Image (tube, grey):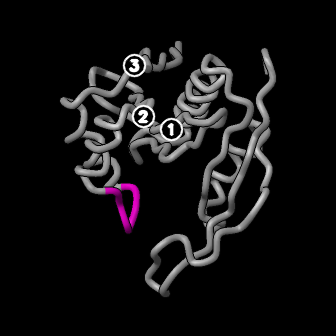
């Protein structure tokens, strides 16, 4: 008899200073131009809604959300390369959208590289649409890459 492997449980909780080393490590392994440890530390110190997804007692993903003036801005959302394609990005995004709704935010914004097809597909699946383009926003090996600015209107229960 073949038994299906059961995925280990995961939890999403607030990021703590003790998580920063693992978060920074995931960031370095995920991006050619990663955020520094200090940027993550500053996000915590600034009071941004910073979350980690925990699997097997280790950080498997994270998200940083800024909320101000009636809108939210997703600053970073990343899943450890080892744990991609398991729905963890969706779970983190849904948690961040829940935080925005709880804060009575009307709109959530983010920037994403147009070359990041996986992220674009996730955001579109969750109802984000492109509202603008930021020229030369991201560093790249060919100079700079534009950013697609995406938005999602939030309504109660949506």
Q: Residue 50: name its quadrant.
A: top left
Residue under numbered circle 2: 48
Rendered residue at 42%/36% (across/down): 62
Task: Give the mark nearer the N terminus: 2 vs 1.
Answer: 2
Q: Within 10 Å of the Cα at label 3, are there few (<14), some (14-19), or many (20+) other Cα atoms?
A: few
Query: Is disc 2 in contact with disc 1, using a CB cutoff of under 8 Å?
Result: yes
- Percent x, y of residue 85: 55, 40
Q: Is residue 52 magenta?
A: no
Quick one: which residue is furthest to the bottom in this view?
A: 142
Residue range highlighted in magenta = 30-35
Please give the residue where the numbered disc 3 appears in the rendered image: 13
For the residues labelled 2 and 1, the Cα–Cα distance comes to 5 Å
Q: Position of residue 14 (x, y in %)?
A: 37, 22
Q: Residues within 10 Å of mark 2 (few under 14, many from 20)?
A: some
The residues tagged by marks 3 and 2 sit, at their Cα atoms, a distance apart of 14 Å
Characterize the local packing of mark 1: few (<14), some (14-19) or many (20 or more) Cα atoms within 10 angstroms: many
Residue 95, by quadrant, is top right
The quadrant of the picture occupied by the C terminus is top right
Q: Which of the two discs, 3 and 1, labels the residue nearer the N terminus?
A: 3
Q: Secondary structure at mark 3?
A: strand
Please state the horizontal and vertical placement of residue 2, each as a whole percent of the image. Answer: 52, 17
Mark 1 element type? strand
Instruction: Tell me which label, 3 or 2, sits earlier in the chain.
Output: 3
For mark 2, give the secondary structure.
loop
Residue linked to disc 1 = 66
């Amino acid at each position: 008899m073949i038994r299906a492997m059961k995925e280990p449980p995961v939890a999403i909780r607030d990021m703590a200073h003790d998580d920063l080393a693992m978060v920074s490590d995931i960031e370095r392994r995920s991006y050619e131009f990663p955020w520094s440890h200090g940027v993550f530390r500053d996000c915590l110190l600034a009071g941004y809604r910073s979350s980690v997804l925990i699997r097997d007692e280790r950080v498997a993903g994270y998200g940083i959300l800024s909320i101000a003036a009636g809108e939210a801005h997703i600053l970073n959302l990343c899943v450890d390369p080892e744990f991609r394609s398991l729905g963890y990005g969706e779970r983190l995004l849904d948690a961040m959208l829940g935080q925005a709704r709880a804060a009575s935010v009307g709109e959530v914004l983010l920037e994403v590289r147009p070359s990041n097809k996986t992220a674009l597909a996730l955001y579109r699946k969750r109802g984000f649409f492109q509202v603008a383009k930021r020229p030369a926003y991201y560093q790249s090996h060919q100079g700079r890459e534009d950013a697609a600015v995406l938005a999602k209107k939030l309504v109660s229960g949506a």
